[in-house]
């Protein structure tokens, strides 16, 4: 460990930061005697937050940022003139352990540029995780990228040590991927995904027969798509996500608002700002699919192929379907309550358990944390009838709810001021 | 107004519950011994903490409540909020006076408040797990100062013990002046008599292990490089990592 490592660390962190995956959840592992670390599961722990508000849970780092590919959207493409560096296996292992001991990180996120060929790179990465798990008896979280095009044997070897693996799709349609990264295709992405899934399902089956059969990628796999670099609509993106979520091993799809890192490339759109609002709306839609029992075709369809940037997708769905409302919170099914704008998963559960004791009124709902500003137009409860969406009309309701909050001290335009003569 | 005075311990509090039921008078307010009595006090009673009584109340609570709810009571107690003992008392009365379990009745104000306060303390516990930063001292002990809003340190200890089981560490609450030391086998509670030099939360360079400075530099360098400048969002940054933790965070120095 010396100053040299600091330079390498900075360079390789710069190169790795555009990968958005960060979660450290999905699996529980207790520490072993003489070992270091554990994995808590549940929510996962974020140890720090960078100034852009993204969490630093794992030591997100690349083994090397040398790469044989020339993908237009990637900062590490071979034609870019940037500082290149490569960690030795030992350096990376030491860094992980020492950072972990100081409670800086929850685990390791290992990614890499492709050197020589996919298998050569993958083999080096496997050596890092193997050393952590076997030599240092490290029980913290490990997220490992699978290099597109790597062989099944190496994926299988990695899966025994990693908690989660991921292969990034990056561009949702094959056609656009060909345009931006002519050396890659979707097959090279979906193949390792299949290997991971096979290994995982096999391990689950074996563990039902033999209690101590090894676990294989217990926290499943994730993937990432870049949003706004190509012309796909939100419908294309969400349809692909929902297809991915139908696979038993796929736990998360991440959306990364495109940041023009290679602005000289004319194949890419010229953006002033990364499409942050769109990225946020996509995540909201993703949550609707995973936790709110929505289908992708309910959120976006041919008539509305893109998400509304002004209002969130759940409210947008509710405004398009006034016939579903008002919902009686004291009687309706849990799945219907989940669809009310202003009520989340936690509030919905609170409502369902509490209403067995007595009818709930608006005051109690507000106390429980329901956003009545939105919800009041979509519910009936133990209260005198109020104006619901059917009386107010969706167009007007949209206007009410999107009105920007008046800032403190701002003068109401419609209020006449009293002028006192001096 | 009926007032009970007790010694501000959890056992004392449970004894107060026992005494209230056995004497059939229920306090409107619980106060610590020696605090000033309110102006309109009709009756007062001083609770003498008795282990057997508190144990009986706790055992019967465990019978009537789920494990989660019992934990919640513990969390609320550790909040040390003004009036949280009155809240607990009202809650426990509702538990004993109802035939059916009330713990899921979030339409009830006390049940909801217990739930919400327990959640706040749990959040503080999570903050500890997130933002504790160990500094390695020259003798190989990892030291971390904290000052949580609620007394959540005891809740995080089992996690730390499991995770850092092969290194000796000290976590010290500078606000409440106590901490825990793990000696590779067990965790013991400690109080440092001379903690003046720790108040800044930073170890002296003389006390620091040789390579500690280097790893701090490495972590700071890494943290800086991870920021994407096109996406800077200070408000979100502060929302996730409130300013009160910054003084102990290596990367924010």
Image (cartoon, coloured by chain):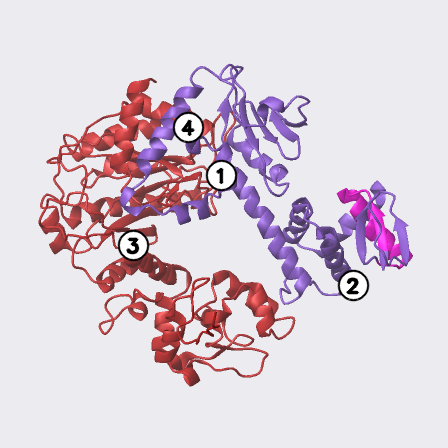
Chain colours: A red, B purple
As helix, strand or loop, the secondary structure at mark 2 comes to helix
Q: Chain of mark 2?
A: B
Determine the CA span between mark 2 and mark 4. 52 Å
Identity of the residue drawn at 49% across and 75% down: A376
Task: Choose mark 3 or mark 2, whichever is in front.
Answer: 3
In the image: residue A12, left or right of residue A54: left
Q: Residue B84 got which mark?
A: none
Q: Which residue in the protein does label 2 denote?
A: B97
As helix, strand or loop, the secondary structure at mark 1 comes to helix
Task: Please say if the residues under marks 3 and 1 sit with CB atoms less than 8 Å apart.
Answer: no
Q: Which residue in the protein does label 4 denote?
A: A99
In the image: residue A166, left or right of residue B112: left
Q: Quadrant of residue A393?
A: bottom left
Q: Return the residue nearer the eye: A185 or B174.
A: B174
Q: Which residue in the protein does label 3 denote?
A: A276
Q: Residue furthest front?
A: A422
Inspect this view and state whether residue A387 appears.
yes
In this rendering, the answer to whether A223 lies above or below A146 is: below
Task: Please say if the residues under marks 2 and 1 sit with CB atoms less than 8 Å apart.
Answer: no
Task: Choose mark 3 or mark 1, whichever is in front.
Answer: 3
As helix, strand or loop, the secondary structure at mark 3 comes to helix
Identity of the residue drawn at 31% across and 55% down: A247
Q: Which residues are magenta?
A: B3-26
Task: Choose mark 2 or mark 4, whichever is in front.
Answer: 4
Q: Which residue in the protein does label 1 denote?
A: B130
């Amino acid at each position: 460990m010396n100053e040299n490592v600091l330079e390498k660390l900075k360079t390789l962190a710069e190169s790795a930061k555009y990968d958005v995956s960060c979660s450290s959840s999905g699996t529980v592992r207790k520490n072993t005697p003489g070992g270091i670390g554990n994995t808590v599961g549940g929510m996962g722990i974020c140890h720090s937050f960078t100034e852009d508000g993204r969490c630093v849970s794992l030591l997100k780092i690349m083994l090397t940022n040398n790469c044989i590919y020339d993908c237009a959207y990637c900062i590490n493409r071979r034609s870019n003139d940037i500082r290149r560096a490569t960690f030795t296996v030992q350096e990376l292992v030491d860094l992980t352990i020492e950072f972990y001991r100081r409670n800086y990180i929850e685990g390791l996120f290992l990614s890499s540029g492709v050197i020589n060929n996919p298998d050569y790179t993958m083999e080096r990465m496997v050596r890092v995780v193997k050393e952590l798990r076997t030599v240092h008896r490290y029980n913290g979280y490990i997220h490992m990228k699978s290099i597109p095009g790597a062989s099944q044997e190496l994926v299988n070897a990695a899966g025994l040590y990693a908690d989660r693996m991921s292969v990034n799709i990056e561009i949702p349609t094959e056609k656009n991927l060909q345009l931006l990264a002519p050396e890659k295709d979707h097959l090279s992405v979906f193949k390792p995904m299949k290997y991971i899934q096979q290994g995982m399902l096999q391990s689950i089956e074996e563990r039902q027969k033999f209690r101590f059969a090894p676990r294989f990628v217990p926290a499943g796999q994730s993937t990432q798509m870049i949003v706004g670099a190509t012309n796909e609509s939100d419908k294309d993106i969400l349809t692909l996500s929902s297809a991915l979520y139908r696979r038993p091993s796929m736990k998360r799809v991440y959306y990364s608002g495109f940041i023009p890192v290679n602005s000289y490339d004319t194949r890419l759109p010229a953006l002033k700002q990364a499409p942050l609002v769109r990225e946020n709306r996509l995540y909201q839609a993703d949550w609707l699919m995973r936790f709110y029992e929505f289908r992708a075709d309910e959120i976006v369809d041919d008539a509305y192929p893109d998400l509304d940037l002004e209002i969130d997708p759940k409210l947008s769905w509710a405004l398009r379907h006034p016939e579903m409302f008002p919902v009686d919170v004291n009687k309706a099914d849990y799945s219907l309550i989940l669809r009310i704008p202003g009520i989340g998963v936690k509030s919905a559960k609170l409502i369902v358990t509490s209403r067995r004791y007595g009818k709930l009124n608006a005051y109690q709902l507000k106390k429980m944390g329901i956003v009545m500003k939105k919800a009041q137009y979509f519910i009936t409860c133990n209260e005198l009838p109020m104006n619901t969406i059917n009386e107010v009309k969706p167009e007007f309701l949209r206007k009410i709810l999107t009105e920007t909050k008046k800032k403190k001290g701002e003068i109401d335009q419609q209020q006449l001021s009293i002028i006192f003569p001096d | 107004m009926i007032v009970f005075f007790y010694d501000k311990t959890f056992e004392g509090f449970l004894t107060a519950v026992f005494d209230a039921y056995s004497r059939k008078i229920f306090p409107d307010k619980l106060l610590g011994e020696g605090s000033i009595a309110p102006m309109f006090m009709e009756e007062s009673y001083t609770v003498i903490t008795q282990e057997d009584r508190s144990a009986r109340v706790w055992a019967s609570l465990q019978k009537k409540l789920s494990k989660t709810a019992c934990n919640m009571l513990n969390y609320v107690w550790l909040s040390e909020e003004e009036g949280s003992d009155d809240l607990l008392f009202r809650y426990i009365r509702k538990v004993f006076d109802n035939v059916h379990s009330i713990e899921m009745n979030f339409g009830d104000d006390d049940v909801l408040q217990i739930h919400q306060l327990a959640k706040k303390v749990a959040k503080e516990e999570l903050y500890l797990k997130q933002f504790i930063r160990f500094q390695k001292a020259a003798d190989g002990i990892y030291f971390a100062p904290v000052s949580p809003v609620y007394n959540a340190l005891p809740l995080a200890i089992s996690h730390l013990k499991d995770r850092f089981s092969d290194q000796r560490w000290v976590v010290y609450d500078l606000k409440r002046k106590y901490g825990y030391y793990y000696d590779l086998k067990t965790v013991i509670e400690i109080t440092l008599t001379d903690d003046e030099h720790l108040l800044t939360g930073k170890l002296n360079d003389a006390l620091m292990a040789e390579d500690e400075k280097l790893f701090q530099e490495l972590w700071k360098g890494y943290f800086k490089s991870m920021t994407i400048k096109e996406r800077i969002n200070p408000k979100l940054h502060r929302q996730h990592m409130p300013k009160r933790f910054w003084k102990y965070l290596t990367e924010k120095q």
